[in-house]
C-alpha cells in the first residue's frame, strides 16, 4: 500500500514540476518580446516554414472537411425538408469550431514536432551550451521567433482553411446535392455573425501560442541522446493536441456565456 502511495505521489509531483517548468518557459518566451535583441530574420524564416510549409495540408484538410460536412448535414436536414440550409451549417461549423481546431491540430502535428526535434537535437549535441557560452540566450534566439511566427501565421492558415472548407461544401452542394449557387452562398453570408468570426479568429492566436511554447519546451527538456529526441517529439505533439482540445472547450464555454 505504501509503495502504491509513493508511486502516486511521485507521479503527482512530476506533473506539478512539469507544469511549473512549462509556465516559466511561457512567461520567459513572452517577456523576451519586450527586450532586445530581436531576431527578425529568424522570425521570418519560421513564418515561412510554418505558414507556407503548412499551406498544402491546411487546404486539403479544409476542403475535405467542408465536403464531408456538406454531405452529412444534407443527410440530416433532408428529413426536415431543409436541405437548402446546408451552407449555413457548413459555414458556421467551420468558422466557429472545426476550422480553428483542425488547423491547429495539423500545425501541431507538423510544426510542434519539428520544433521539439530541432531544439532537442541541439540540446543533445551541446549546441545550446555553446550558445550560452557565446552570450546568446537560447530561449530568445530559438523560442520567441517560433512563438511570434506561429501566433502570426496560424490565424491566416485558419482563415484559408475556413474559406477552402466552405468552398468544398459548395462543390458538394452544387454538384451532388443540386443546391443552387445563389442559395448556398446567401445562407453562408446571412448566417455568419460577427461573434462567429470573432470566436473563429480568437482561438488560433491562443492555439498558436500553445503549439510554439509546448514544442520549444519539450525540445529544451530533451535528454538521453537521439532516443530522447524522439521521445520529446512525441510528447510535444501529444501535449499540444490535448491542450488545444482542452482550451477550445474552455474558450467555447466563455464565448457562449458572454458573447451570445
Image (cartoon, rainbow, N blue to C red):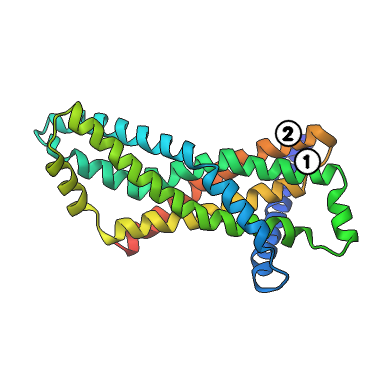
Residue 119: percent from left, percent from top: 75, 46
Residue 245: percent from left, percent from top: 48, 45
Q: Is residue 149 above or below residue 89?
A: below
**Outermost residue to the right:** 133
Residue 166: percent from left, percent from top: 29, 42
Residue 43: percent from left, percent from top: 63, 58
Q: Quadrant of residue 75?
A: top left
Judge by depth and name the residue closer to the eye, 195 or 256. 195
Residue at mark 1: 6
**Outermost residue to the top:** 176
The quadrant of the rendering that contains the C terminus is: bottom left
Could you say whether the residue bearing mark 2 is in a helix, strand or loop? helix
Question: Viewer-nearest of labels 1 and 2?
Answer: 2
Residue at 27% in and 45% down: 91
Mark 1 residue crowding within 10 angstroms, few (<14) / some (14–19) / many (20+): few
Residue at mark 2: 230
Could you say whether the residue bearing mark 1 is in a helix, strand or loop? helix
User: Position of 221 compared to 172: left or right?
Assistant: right
Amino acid at each position: 500500500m505504501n509503495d502504491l502511495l509513493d508511486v502516486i505521489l511521485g507521479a503527482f509531483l512530476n506533473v506539478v514540476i512539469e507544469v511549473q517548468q512549462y509556465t516559466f518557459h511561457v512567461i520567459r518566451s513572452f517577456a523576451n518580446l519586450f527586450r532586445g535583441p530581436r531576431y527578425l530574420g529568424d522570425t521570418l524564416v519560421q513564418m515561412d516554414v510554418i505558414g507556407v510549409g503548412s499551406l498544402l495540408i491546411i487546404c486539403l484538410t479544409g476542403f475535405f472537411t467542408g465536403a464531408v460536412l456538406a454531405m452529412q448535414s444534407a443527410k440530416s436536414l433532408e428529413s426536415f425538408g431543409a436541405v437548402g440550409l446546408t451552407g449555413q451549417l457548413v459555414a458556421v461549423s467551420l468558422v466557429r469550431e472545426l476550422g480553428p481546431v483542425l488547423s491547429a491540430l495539423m500545425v501541431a502535428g507538423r510544426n510542434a514536432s519539428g520544433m521539439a526535434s530541432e531544439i532537442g537535437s541541439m540540446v543533445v549535441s551541446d549546441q545550446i551550451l555553446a550558445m550560452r557560452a557565446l552570450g546568446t540566450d537560447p530561449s530568445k534566439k530559438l523560442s520567441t521567433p517560433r512563438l511570434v511566427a506561429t501566433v502570426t501565421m496560424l490565424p491566416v492558415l485558419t482563415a484559408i482553411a475556413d474559406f477552402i472548407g466552405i468552398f468544398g461544401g459548395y462543390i458538394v452542394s452544387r454538384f451532388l446535392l443540386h443546391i443552387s449557387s445563389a442559395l448556398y452562398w446567401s445562407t453562408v453570408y446571412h448566417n455568419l455573425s460577427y461573434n462567429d468570426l470573432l470566436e473563429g479568429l480568437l482561438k488560433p492566436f491562443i492555439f498558436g501560442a500553445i503549439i510554439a511554447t509546448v514544442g520549444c519546451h519539450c525540445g529544451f527538456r530533451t535528454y538521453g541522446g537521439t532516443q530522447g529526441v524522439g521521445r520529446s517529439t512525441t510528447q510535444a505533439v501529444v501535449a499540444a493536441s490535448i491542450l488545444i482540445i482542452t482550451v477550445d472547450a474552455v474558450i467555447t464555454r466563455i464565448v457562449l456565456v458572454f458573447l451570445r
